Image (tube, helix red, strand yellow):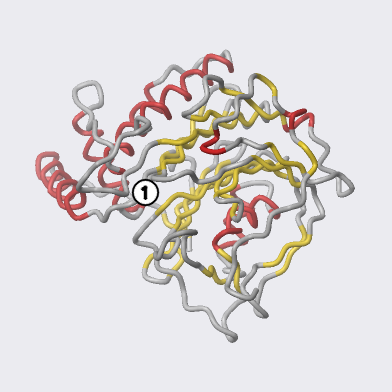
Amino acid sequence: MAFHTEETVMPQTLAAWIVVALAIAVTLAAPIAQACTRVVYLGPNDNIITARSMDWKVDVQTNLWIFPRGMARDGQAGSNSIKWTSKYGSVIATGYEISTTDGVNEKGLMANVLWLVESQYPPFGKDSKPGLTIAAWAQYVLDNYATVAEAVAALEKEPFTIVTDAVPGEQRLATLHLSMSDATGDSAIVEYVGGKQVIHHGRQYQVMTNSPTFDQQLALVAYWKQIGGTVMLPGTNRASDRFARAAFYVDAIPKDEDPNRALASVFSVIRNASVPYGITTPDEPNISSTRWRTVFDHKRKLYFFESALTPNTFWVDLKKIDFSEKAPVKRLDLGKDQDHTYSGDATADFKPATPFKFLGLSGS
């Protein structure tokens, strides 16, 4: 179902106190979560830029991959798995070389998955809709849809059941929510709350972090808008504080006609919402350092990657990639902790490779 917020007219002081109380209550009650941030910049001349940070407590073993059209896919959920063939080629960033955590397709659609501890997925069994491993959730969107609107229309019909599994090396299940953005500036956030799919769809949904659920994040940012970002902004590494900072700055930065200056501003925003490398919070061990950032220029189809452990930002030019069905799968080795250094246009540095297998149910 699509979800849209509506404003209710209330006396200003009463409304302010209610939102303040909600903001405090949610911040204190918010469960601990891995920290990531995603923002969408809406600039002039259809200059749309999406940025995200990846914050994790250990090396997430990320590499970049190029996938052509025509790849046969399987939901990796056993005999009752959804099957599809990729309609569009994509460039993606992996997690643990068993999942797509971030990526873009040749039509300019971007998909990102971020941690959301409150996620509850529907039960999965032989009589449910075909299963899709959570590791391939973002890839399914990139393979099949050209725009956010097209993806939302399809996902509202719930063609699959999300199937989750343990995070590699940990005892807990992967609990994620999905964001999408496209070359028109359209956005959508997809969450599973209480076992039900909830979709927030619209250009106004420019920012996503982690806990709490997205509807409560919107309430928090409403509070900070009343205070005004030039007066005070929260500065901690909590998800709710990063949401407030990113939401303020992505609208406050100049809407520059120069795409390179706009890109510089967006990089500044996502860096501002990042957690310094090496920072740990003793009483909140899962708030983690930012390990890498991606920024996608939807108009120029440039996918930028920045590791915390290298001195350079580099990019992949989707316009130079052969996404045809006969084209090989390729991989860019980023090294342990993404410490390999690339500079400028790294499109030609990808090497042919055997595709990784998405993590699924045991035996699938």
Q: Which residue is mark 1?
A: 34
Direction front: furthest residue: 336
Crowdedness of circle 1 by 10 Å Cα count: few (<14), some, many (20+)? Answer: many
Q: Nearer the viewer, residue 314 or 157?
A: 314
Kind of residue at disc 1: Gln
* Circle count: 1
Residue 299 horizontal/vertical position (percent): 65, 28
Reply above or below: 344 against 121: above
Question: Residue 245 appears in which quarter of the rendering?
Answer: top left
In the displayed structure, 296 sits above or below 281; it is above
Q: How far from the left and from the top, in percent, is residue 203?
A: 49, 40
Q: Residue at x 64, y 69 (%)?
A: 76
In this rendering, position of residue 194 left or right of residue 155? left
Q: Secondary structure at mark 1?
A: loop
Question: Which residue is found at the position 10% from the left and 40% from the top?
Answer: 13
Task: Please name whichever residue, 350 or 224, is drawn nearer the observer in this view of the structure.
Answer: 350
Q: Residue furthest right?
A: 326
Which residue sits at x=77%, y=53%? 87
Report x, y in % for residue 303. 63, 31
In the image, farthest residue toward the bottom: 127
Q: Image check: 114 left or right of 312?
A: left
Which quarter shows the C terminus? bottom right
Residue 91 placement (x, y as % from top left): 68, 41
Residue 49 sits in quarter: top right
Q: In the image, 144: left or right of 258?
A: right
186 shown above or below 197: above
